[in-house]
Image (tube, rainbow, N blue to C red):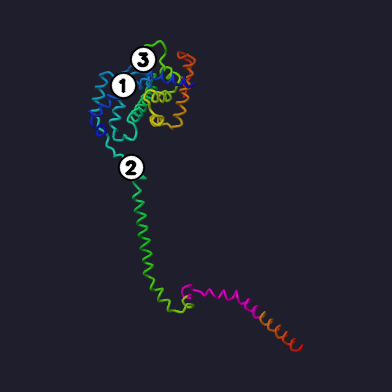
Amino acid sequence: MAKEGSVPAFSELVEIYQGRLIRFLLGRCRNRADAEDAIQDTFINAYRYIGSYNPRWRFSTWLFRIALRNAARISQVAEATADDIPDNAGDPLEACIVASERENLWLTARRLLSAEAYSAMWLRYVEDMSVRDIARTLERPMSWTKVTLMRSRRRLSAELASGHEATANGEAYG
Amino acid sequence: MVKLMDKLERRLKEDAALIKAELAPELQERIRASLESTQPAKQMPRTTKTPGTSLWWASSLTGLAAAALLIVVINWNGGVEPVVEVSDAVPPGITWSIQSGFPLNAETAEWTAPLEEELKNLQSDLEKARESVERDLRLGL
């Protein structure tokens, strides 16, 4: 039904995926407004080009791929106009995290890993995607995805083992 | 190391669950309104068949056509057979010269002529030796 362009049918898909997408996009965007713009564009683009969706792949793979493209585009625009509009909204991911005694590991991941490595880890451990699906979502080779996941795990494991999750001197990695 | 990885995976899942984010009702309404004002792009239907599955019958047809062509060619050659039968009435030597265009046995004769001459010389020597032995025997008797 959704593939035939039915708005009510597609709205059900929006209901299913909106929570998952916004949590992912908050970790990828500079602020909440950018994440909301990205999710809106993602659903509109998905609906507009639903005809090109190949059922051979999981719908979530296709949707997250669109979301990543939109997030990247919005980030580029934000970077280009960063001097014009000051960003005082704070970290959108941190604002949504329930208060805890220790630092949320996803904040650690975002601090230590590159944006793509963070995405790969999120898709693997939160969305339970296969390496193949992650590679397709990130539009990267399988080998790159495997290596990135392995390095990211090592980096976060080392951070867990050292117990210095709150240190803020790590260099982006992955 | 394995335990640390397990702990990492568990922590990643637990911490992801601590991220509470929902779309504001206004944004949901905005998305719905945008969807209603958007038309899906007209696209060609995606073919899920792979080239291999769509061409197997085509290659089979090609094979059948080739086989049929071969049968026709063989039958066509079979129909010309009577012409060969007519040529049987002609003496073999003439037929060979007509079909080949030049006499191949001429070259063979050139190659064997010295040998035949050598054979004649040997036979002549043998005859002379026999006559000489007979003459000696007659003289002895």
The residue sitting at 33% across, 16% down in the picture is: B20
Residue A81 image position (x, y, % from top left)? 38, 21
Q: Which residue is mark 2?
A: B49
Whether marks 2 and 1 lie on the same chain: no
Q: Chain of mark 2?
A: B
- The residue identified by callout 3 is A97
Q: Considering only vertical position in the picture, is A1 above or below A84?
A: below
- 3 or 1: tag closer to the N-terminus: 1
Give the CA distance from mark 3 to mark 2. 46 Å
Residue B71 percent across, percent down from the top left = 36, 62
Answer few, some or many: residues within 10 Å of disc 2's Cα (few below 14, many 20 plus, some between 14 and 19).
few
- Asked which secondary structure carries label 2, the reply is loop
Q: Is residue B106 left or right of residue B91?
A: right
Q: Name the residue nearer the viewer: A166 or B52.
A: B52
Asked whether B74 or A17 is in front, the reply is B74
Stretch of the chain drawn in magenta? B96-120
**Structural distance between the alpha carbons of marks 2 and 1:** 35 Å
What chain letter is assigned to the residue under label 1? A
Q: Looking at the picture, which amino acid does disc 1 mark?
A: Gly
Label at residue A19:
1
B73 relative position to B26: left or right: right
* Prevailing secondary structure class for the magenta stretch in the rendered image: helix
Snapshot quadrant of residue B34: top left
